[in-house]
Image (cartoon, rainbow, N blue to C red):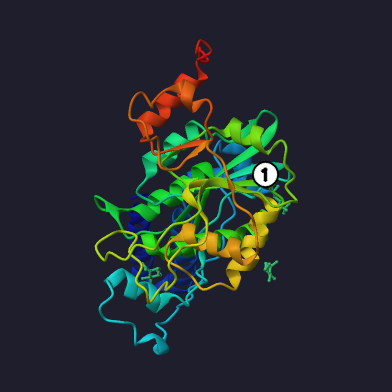
């Protein structure tokens, strides 16, 4: 508004000056000078004055100031670049009787490298246990529950623990807001999102696995142990730490709820259906229930090497079993990993039972909070039955 008034005033002055023909020379000089100043004034007003004040207040190293001034975390982000992976021409003869997800899987099986979209804060030098949790954009309530219960960042019994969520790309929305926006916000707030640009589907979980293994061997290979699990398991973090006390991270360790002999499901209507075309053998190799398992650094790194030369298989837990077989790693069964929940229905939601467990599948966020608070209760008394 002010600029407009100034402009009007100047136009008026010019008009008056031009009327007096005798002083043409001077009026042109004066007018030009005025016009230049107007342009300067207008340019200056493009930047709100408050912004300029903020810039003046910043110290020389802006990134450092920002890091300290904000309570939350902004991890360094990778530059986005698009890598297209086209449908393999040689794969056109995929059996047409297979269900759509299976056909889709076979069509894209050769696409193994997708760009990273979001990165977590760097792994700390003294990282002891990395909790790598498979999640999807929509499961925000589960992530909130984990961050504030058993996945809390920091030190547990003097050992550094880091929580990390592994996510793909979802096109879902909440009202008109894309979940990508939500994830980006979460990433800035908590620095615990590791995301790649592939569709977050059930059959793409193996892609998540191989991308995680790649990331680990590049950016977190000094972490001593890794727990890999789902976002709906309750993990007794200090029991995990207790368990690894007797182990060495430079030796192999793969512990979980081991399924020694599972048969591929051949019924087309079931979630885990695998046709003979995709897996002809009668049995799967031994593998751990995907709710969660614990590995040493050496095992994770070896898995990464093995996976890079193995064809993808749609069920990620089985795929890990295949890789383990390939490199002759023994799977250790531990009864504390309840990846299929409890068999007995009666009073399974009992903190005294949970106290003895490594993990229990599956709890909703409210149950997660409840169990966590029960276990923290200093008055909790458990009597050993004799
Ligand atoms: C600014 O601070 C960051 C983080 O402390 C550091 O990595 C960077 O080198 C600094 N840049 C300059 C120009 O001092
Ligand atoms: C896996 O992700 C890729 C890339 O987003 C997508 O093209 C493909 O359809 C997905 N595969 C399955 C089986 O969902
Ligand atoms: C695994 O064991 C088999 C048979 O004992 C052997 O042939 C193979 O070379 C071993 N593989 C590795 C990676 O050690």
| Whether the residue under disc 1 has CB within 8 Å of ligand 1 | no
In the picture, measured across the screen, residue 151 lies left or right of residue 158, that is: left
Q: Which residue is identified by label 1?
A: 59
User: Which of the 4 image quarters holds residue 13?
Assistant: bottom left
Q: Can you give x and y, in whole percent of width and height, for residue 283 in the image?
A: 45, 64
State the residue in front, 206 or 19. Answer: 206
Q: Residue shown at 37%/70% (left/top)? A: 18
State the residue in front, 356 or 202. Answer: 356
Q: Is residue 359 above or below residue 258?
A: above
Q: Can you give x and y, in whole percent of width and height, for residue 88 in the image?
A: 42, 85
Q: Residue shown at 32%/58% (left/top)? A: 8
Q: Is residue 213 above or below residue 245?
A: below
- How many labels were placed on the picture? 1
Q: Residue shown at 51%/55% (left/top)? A: 287
Q: Can you give x and y, in whole percent of width and height, for residue 58 in the image?
A: 62, 44
In the picture, measured across the screen, residue 248 lies left or right of residue 142, that is: right
Q: Residue shown at 37%/45% (left/top)? A: 139
User: Which of the 4 image quarters holds residue 145?
Assistant: top left
Residue 111 visible, this orientation: yes
């Amino acid at each position: 508004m002010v600029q407009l008034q100034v402009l009007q005033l100047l136009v008026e002055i010019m008009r008056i000056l031009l009327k007096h023909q005798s002083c043409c020379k001077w009026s042109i000089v004066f007018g030009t000078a005025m016009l230049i100043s107007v342009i300067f004034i207008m340019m200056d007003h493009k930047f709100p004055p408050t912004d300029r004040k903020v810039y003046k207040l910043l110290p020389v190293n802006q990134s450092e100031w920002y890091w300290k001034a904000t309570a939350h975390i902004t991890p360094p982000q990778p530059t986005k670049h698009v890598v297209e992976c086209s449908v393999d021409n040689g794969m056109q003869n995929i059996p047409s009787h297979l269900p759509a997800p299976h056909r889709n899987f076979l069509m894209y099986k050769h696409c193994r490298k997708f760009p990273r979209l979001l990165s977590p804060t760097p792994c700390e030098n003294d990282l002891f246990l990395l909790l790598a949790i498979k999640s999807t954009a929509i499961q925000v309530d589960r992530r909130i529950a984990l961050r504030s219960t058993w996945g809390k960042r920091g030190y547990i019994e003097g050992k550094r623990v880091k929580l990390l969520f592994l996510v793909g790309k979802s096109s879902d929305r909440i009202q008109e807001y894309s979940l990508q926006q939500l994830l980006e916000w979460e990433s800035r707030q908590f620095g615990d999102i590791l995301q790649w640009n592939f569709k977050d589907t059930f059959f793409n979980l193996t892609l998540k696995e191989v991308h995680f293994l790649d990331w680990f061997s590049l950016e977190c290979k000094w972490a001593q142990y890794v727990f890999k699990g789902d976002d709906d398991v309750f993990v007794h973090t200090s029991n995990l730490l207790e368990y690894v006390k007797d182990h060495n991270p430079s030796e192999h360790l793969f512990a979980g709820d081991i399924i020694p002999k599972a048969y591929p499901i051949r019924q087309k209507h079931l979630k885990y259906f695998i046709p003979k075309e995709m897996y002809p053998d009668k049995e799967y190799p031994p593998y751990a229930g995907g709710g969660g398992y614990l590995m040493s650094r050496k095992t994770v790194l070896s898995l990464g090497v093995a996976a890079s030369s193995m064809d993808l298989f749609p069920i990620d837990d089985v795929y890990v079993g295949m890789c383990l077989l390939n490199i002759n790693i023994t799977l250790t069964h531990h009864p504390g990993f309840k990846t299929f929940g409890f068999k007995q229905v009666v009073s399974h939601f009992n903190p005294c039972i949970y106290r003895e467990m490594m993990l229990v599948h599956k709890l909703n966020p409210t149950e997660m909070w409840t169990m966590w608070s029960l276990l923290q209760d200093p008055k909790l008394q458990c009597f050993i039955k004799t």
